[in-house]
Amino acid sequence: MGGTIKDVARLAGVSMSTVSAALNNEPGVSENTRFRIIAVAEKLHYEPNILARGLVTKRSHTIGLVISDIANPF
């Protein structure tokens, strides 16, 4: 398992919101800081938490399928 956004922020010496902004290419983060954050994230094998992102965006990117009789071809 990779590091968390909190781990990346601690090792890069920035806040979690700065890490988020840098990794999402938002404005307001200097190139030097962005490169430092990306280097730390790669070192820790950071991957975004999809479940946490779903809570924020209110989207799960999941679909459901209901089949009453899977053996019936009609």
Image (spheres, rainbow, N blue to C red):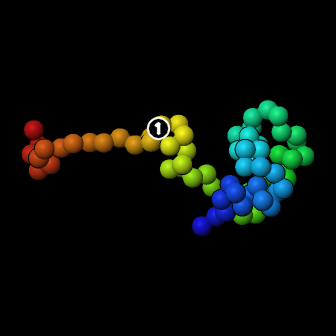
Q: Quadrant of residue 63?
A: top left
Q: Is residue 24 visible?
A: yes
Q: Is residue 43 left or right of residue 54?
A: right
| Number of numbered markers | 1
Q: Secondary structure at mark 1?
A: loop
- Residue extending farthest to the top is 27
Q: Is residue 51 left or right of residue 39?
A: left
Q: Residue at (79%, 32%) from the top-left corner? A: 27
Q: Quadrant of the N terminus?
A: bottom right
Q: Residue at (85%, 53%) from the top-left corner? A: 36
Q: Residues within 10 Å of mark 1 (few under 14, many from 20)?
A: few
Q: Residue at (65%, 59%) from the top-left corner? A: 4
Q: Residue at (48%, 37%) from the top-left corner? A: 58
Q: Is residue 45 visible?
A: no
Where does the image place residue 72, in percent across and percent down from the top left? Answer: 9, 45
- Residue extending farthest to the right is 32
Where does the image place residue 41, in percent across and percent down from the top left? Answer: 74, 57
Where does the image place residue 25, in percent across and percent down from the top left? Answer: 74, 37
Where does the image place residue 15, in percent across and percent down from the top left? Answer: 77, 49
Q: Amino acid at mark 1?
A: Arg
Vertical relation: 67 (above or below) 41:
above
Q: Quadrant of the C terminus?
A: top left
Vertical relation: 32 (above or below) 27:
below
Task: Return the residue nearer the eye: 69 or 4.
Answer: 4
Identify the residue position indicated by label 1 in the image.
59
- Residue extending farthest to the bottom is 1
